[in-house]
Structures are given as C-alpha cells and as structure tokens.
Amino acid sequence: MTSGARRVWTRITSLLPGHDDLADVRRDPRRDLLAGLTVAIVALPLALGFGVSSGLGAEAGLATAVVAGALAAVFGGSNLQVSGPTGAMTVVLVPIVGTYGPTGVLTVGLVAGVLLVALAAMRAGKYMQYVPAPVVEGFTLGIACVIGLQQIPNALGVPKPEGDRVLVVTWRAVEEFAHSPNWTAVGLAVAVAAVMLAGARWRPTVPFSIVAVIAVTVVAQLAHLDAAQPIGDLPSGLPAPTLAFLDPGALGSLLAPAVAVAALAALESLLSASVADGMTVGQRHDPDRELFGQGLANIASPLFGGVPATGAIARTAVNVRTGATSRLASLTHAAVLAVIVFAAAPLVSRIPLAALAGVLLATAIRMVEVGSLRAMARATRSDALILVLTAVATLALDLVYAVIIGLVVAGALALRAVAQQARLDQVPLDRGDHTAEEHALLAEHIVAYRLDGPLFFAAAHRFLLELTEVADVRVIVLRMARVSTMDATGALVLKDAVEKLTRRGILVLASGIRPGQRQVLDSVGALELLQPDGREYATTPEAIRAARDHLELTGILSADTVPQQPAPKPALPSESQEEPA
C-alpha cells in the first residue's frame, strides 16, 4: 500500500466506531438503558411536533428520530449526543416544502448528508470553535422565537395560512382565529405548555411533556372534543427504503437549499455536542466524526421518508442529566421510538395537534437562557449588537443568512478592535554622548516614530494620514520592531507614505525590521525605499547615526557642529528586536 493510500485508509478508519466505543457501552449498560428510555419519552412528542411543523407529517418526524437517531448514535463523534428532527431544521425546511414539495425536502436531505460526509473528510469540524458566543446566543434566541411563532396556527386551532414568512403566517392565523375562535385548542395548548414549564421547575428529571400530552389526549377523547384536531393516521412501521423521490434533473436548483441544510446541521450538531461536553467531566467529542455520523444519518433518513436531522440540544441535555455515559443511551432512545412506531401508531395518531403545539411552545420558551442573554448584552456593546442582529436576521430572513450576518459583523468589529491597537508614537531621540545643545540641534532635524501593533488593511490608511502629517523635518526614523503583523495593504500604504515624504525632501529610515516584514515589504518594493543606502539598521542608534551622516553630507549640519559619536556596540540578539524608547 502506498503512503497516500495509507493516509486515506487511516483517515477513513478514524471516522468509524472503534474498540473504545464498545468498551464505553459495556461500562454501565443499565444506566444507559434507563437514560435512553427517558429520552425517548421526551423525544416522542417533539418528533411528532417537528414532523408536523416541517410540512411532511408526524410520520416523517418519527422516521427521522428512529433512523437518524440510531445512525448518528453509532457513527457520531459524541458519546452523549441525541439526534433527530429539531426546531431549527424545521425553520429551514418550511420554505423548502413550500417551494419544492415533500420530494424536494427528501432530496435536499440526501444531498446535505453527502456534503456533511465531505466536510468530515476535509476535517472541517475544528472550525466550529471560531463561531463567537454572541452569534450562538443570538442564533438560539431567534430559533426559539421562530419555533414559538410556527406553533400559533395549531395552538389557535386554525388551518395553517399560506406563506413562507413566519411573521406573516402568524398574523394571518391570528386574524383567522379572531373570525372563528377555537378556545378548545387554545386551552389544550396552554395546559400542556403550563404543565411542562411548571414541572420543569418542580422536578426537572420527570418527562412532563409526555405526561401532559397523554393527559390532554385522554381528556379530548373522553369529552369528545371535536375542536381538538388529532394528528391523523400514522403508518404501523417504517416504509421500505426507496430512492423514488430522487429527481436528478432538479439537483441543480436544490443545491443551494442543500448547502443551507448541511451548514445548519453541522452548526447545530457541533453546538449540541459542545454543550454536552460542558455538562460533563471527561467527555470530549470528535467534531469531524460527528459530522461524519450526521452525514450518514441524513443520507439514510430520506430513504425512509424522514426529514434532515441534527444533534438536538434539548434531548442531549436530558440524556446527560439522566446519567448517560455512552452512546448506548441514544441508541436505546431510537430503539424505543421504533417500538412505538410499530406497536402504538393508532394511539399516537389520536394526539391533538394543539397538544403538540403546546409542547413546542414550552420548548421554545425553555430554549431562551435569560442569564446568558443578559451577560452577553452587558459584556460589550459589540457583543450586544452581534446578538441582536443575529436574532433579528434569524426571525426575518433564515438561519443560514443569520449566522453569516452574525459572523460578518463579528469579524468586522473584531478587525476594528484590532486595528485600533495600531499606534504611531513619536519617541525622543536617545541622548547618547551628545551634550544638551547638540541633542537639541539633532532633534530639530530628526524625528523617530515607533510603530506598535498590526499594520494591515484595517489600520493602514489611518497610519498613512498620521505619518504624512508630520512636521517639517529632514529625517524620519521608523522603529518597526514592535509591528506585530503586516499584510500587503500595510506594506503598500507604508510605501506610499515613504514616497510622499521623499517628494517633500524627507529621508525615511527604518530599524528593527523583522524577517517576515522584510518579505512583505520587498514584495511591494517598499524595502529599498526604507534602505536608501542599501544598509540594514538593526537598532535605532544605528539609524540615528546614518541620519546624522546624511545631514552632514547635505550640509545641513557641519562635522564640527555635532561631534562624531562612537559607533554603537554590536547589539545582542535580544537587543536587535528593539531597544527601550
């Protein structure tokens, strides 16, 4: 086997389950089985609700929870992650359903799965750490608002109005309810949400969502509440896998939605896995393997009629809180849901849609961490701005655009903060062996500036203005040892400044140029301008001596006016960076 083939094989095997995973499963199976059962009870109403909200029906949500949940549990990169349909993904899927129909959603999910596998092969998981916390918090807040608004039609007991924008659909639903109120649906939704929110404060480990759903379903059946519209018939089992939905001719138009779904799946799954790591001690997920597992899950889910899936933060948190230690818990959750699909479909079909709306309303409320939002808002004005912009963009546009906007604004503000660190400070000349009178005479003609911080595109033009507005002197010495970084824009601006000063008859010398800076300066032709006599000035005293020689050569100073200063001692390696001002 060649070295290249060996590297490819090593990369593939690193993404597959190993002996360590099997050892983790054997450590405490009883605890994991109990945790998996608890998560399945919590996940059932969520899977049903998100399936209905996506537009593909409750059976699509159940199929996703079973198929994607099992595959992501086996091949994912987290021992504690629980995957399935989520509210964030539902937000993205609704407009896709409206534009391309159910088959379009299934095709998008399949293509997104392939893209996730490709991201895993390219080791893209590590880049998740560069998403700023305000973007994540704003993203979560916006998702919570969208999920809550999506439930308004079912909570009010009215048919879902036409439209792609959640704000428009919500307003039309409210108008429809005002014409023909359905207080039964409102009562059921409010009752379920209230029980879940109050129960979460009283007994956080008890799955009050399933308790509330069962209770209102029983009440609706016994009281014959016709206004409580049920989910409807569900198939007894998963459909046979098929590719009948795939339309190769439509792949071109579906590529953009697939990229959006893949980006969201990667973002939410890696966020959820990071949350799980933070809730435990000693657990750490593999981001690339997590992308690989989510990719396989999204490739398989559409084959069984399921929607695209991601790691689910709420279900993962329940999994951790109930004591899960390995991926056996999330695999058990998928197995329990499969049993429910095959054995209890007729009972599940009687659950009122308003009850599921109540579950998702409570879930949306619990997603909002008021303490985290308050902390972000109080941190800096930049953090508060990023959070608000991301949340508003999530609500008004879509999730992918919201994240892009948040990242762009965060990057721009970060560059602005870094650029403000760049300074151009005039520093006094070293007195050396000169008398006070001699030193004053030199200071009339020579000025030294120290450049601190980065000299790159965001700060370069401000630097140009400051440097070219210096007083009328004969020589300028630029002390560059403290320049932390320099790009081509910074080098070009520096070159422009030197040329303008030269045209004014001012000689510009530089000291302490680092190797990395020298390469950039040389590439744009600025290095030769800073070394007019071809000499390298490692320290400022050397540059000052060259400046004095220039003044004597041009007749500005006479040799007997300023006595010759002894040549400086050779600089030590540590001194070549920059001497104190």
Image (tube, rainbow, N blue to C red):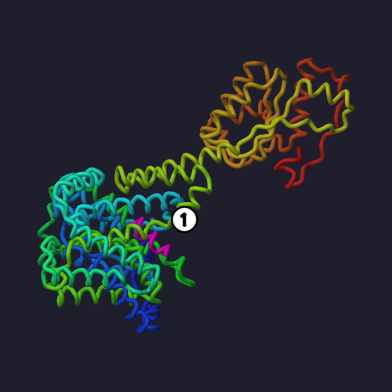
The boundaries of the magenta stretch are 266-275
Quadrant including the C terminus: top right
Callout 1: SS: helix
Residue 59 x, y percent position in the rendering: 16, 65
Residue 351 x, y percent position in the rendering: 17, 67
In front: 151, or 296?
Answer: 151
Question: Would you say residue 97 sits in the magenta stretch?
Answer: no
Residue 389 x, y percent position in the rendering: 40, 42
The residue indicated by pointer 1 is 372
Residue at 30 percent across and 66 percent down: it is 83
Is there any visible trace of residue 299 in the rendered image? no
Residue 518's place in the image compared with 255, above or below, is above
In front: 149, or 254?
Answer: 149
Q: Amino acid at mark 1?
A: Ser
Residue at 66 percent across and 36 percent down: it is 480
In front: 547, or 397?
Answer: 397
Q: Quadrant of residue 188?
A: bottom left
Q: Is residue 196 left or right of residue 519?
A: left
